[in-house]
Amino acid sequence: MNMSTTNNIAQARKLVEQLRIEAGIERIKVIILVIYFVSKAAADLMSYCEQHARSDPLLVGVPTSENPFKDKKPCIIL
Amino acid sequence: VQVNPVKSQPTTSPLIPEMATQEVQLNETLAHLKTESETLKTKLEEERAKLHDVELHQVAEKVEALGQFVMKTRRTLKGHGNKVLCMDWCKDKRRIVSSSQDGKVIVWDAFTTNKEHAVTMPCTWVMACAYAPSGCAVACGGLDNKCSVYPLSLDKNENLAAKKKSVAMHTNYLSACSFTNSDMQILTSSGDGTCALWDVESGQLLQSFHGHAADVLCLDLAPSETGNTFVSGGCDKKANVWDMRSGQCIQSFETHESDINSVRYYPSGDAFASGSDDATCRLYDLRADREVAIYSKESIIFGVSSVDFSLSGRLLFGGYNDYTINVWDVLKGTRVSILFGHENRVSTLRVSPDGTAFCTGSWDHTLRIWA
């Protein structure tokens, strides 16, 4: 075998090895990024729920006197 | 680079056939290596897609669980002669507009259950209706392929049909309509696969939205604070997010396994929920750009027709084709309540503007207010 042929194959093998390592690193990076974004996004959704929970009538329930629909008598518009 | 010493070859037979073989082998090796590097790149993409292990309910594990919910029918609105297909709340939190297969559009006072206005459309199957932000008009349409606006008169005897204004024209049925921030513009979706933005006064088409591969069944506008976008869902199983000014589809989600019948933004505008014929509701986060929750149970096998959030976004209400309403804990992904009452499919569901109640419309010809 001539030298350039051997070198070409060796270099190509090195490239693939490099790519395998990079793919491994990339995979970890992507996993970390996705976990970060989803966690952050999820945390934001949770935070919004928490901030507004107290003013959500269907969530916390309001007394009959305060919910016009819970009052069976027709409402009088003042 | 290590250099392998070349073994000296005895020069006997010609080297050409050997070199030709080696040439072929080299090319094959290079080809294999190239294929492998391509495969690795593809695998990377697949890994990204496969990450189902990070979901909202895991992050929300530390959140307190919800207690028992008592929600009942507080009002029943009777008057339609056939299936109720759509309804919308007025901003005054007490009036409701509903439309039906019987061709009628009715405006109700939900507190008293009185009918305030009634319009007979020239077509049956009025699949879409919407209240104008001012409370002074309603829009509706369906099999007529149009969306028409009716100004509401204070004079109960006045024939509303006389003042009707045809605004939108599609080439197939109108599936949904919504006023934007004012009475001046209407957004529509259609069985013709497009959505469109119209000027109410002139009837002019302002922008059209192409991208769905089949009927578009639903749409919802982003809460005004978050800008000019809206989301649509279709028979192509896709939920698309659109920029209203450019007409571009800026995000697309395809995880449902069947038609998407309903889409609704989360109150903060950072996410939206969808309901589908595949019997699931799903939550998509716009910044994470992926589905973050799925609301389903093995025992639920009928399609979801309509979804809406409670005011804080903690609860998701779904109207189902098995006549029930399922109430989901958005963060934990669990069902917190199941409500019975309707005697046929629930076809439409909306929470009132101040969150004190929600209204459902059904194929059993009635609407119910729940609180």
Image (cartoon, coloured by chain):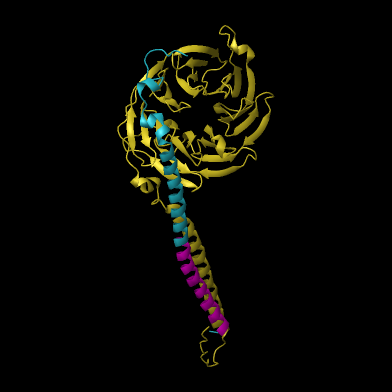
The colour chain A appears in is cyan
Percent position of residue B172, x then y: 58, 27
Question: Given the current orientation, which residue lies at the most extreme top position?
Answer: B157
Quadrant of the rendering where the C terminus of chain B is positioned: top left
Determine the image quadrant of residue B27.
Answer: bottom right
The residue lying at 47 percent from left, 35 percent from top is B259
The residue lying at 46 percent from left, 36 percent from top is B274
Determine the image quadrant of residue B366.
Answer: top left
Q: Name above or below for residue B26 compared with residue B63.
A: below
Q: Is residue B212 visible?
A: no
Question: Given the current orientation, which residue lies at the most extreme front position?
Answer: A78
Q: Nearer the viewer, residue B287 or B212?
A: B287
The magenta segment: A3-27
The colour chain B appears in is yellow
Is residue B159 one of those drawn in magenta?
no
Q: Name above or below for residue B210 compared with residue B368.
A: below
Percent position of residue B30, x then y: 53, 72
Percent position of residue B79, x then y: 45, 12
In this rendering, position of residue B337 left or right of residue B28: left
The residue lying at 56 percent from left, 82 percent from top is B19
Q: What is the chief secondary structure element of the magenta stretch? A: helix
The residue lying at 65 percent from left, 34 percent from top is B207
Percent position of residue B94, x then y: 47, 19
Q: Is residue B263 visible?
A: yes
Q: Name above or below for residue B33 compared with residue B48.
A: below
In this rendering, position of residue B328 left or right of residue B200: left
Q: Nearer the viewer, residue B166 or B135?
A: B135
In this figure, what is the number of numbered marks?
0
Is residue A14 one of those drawn in magenta?
yes
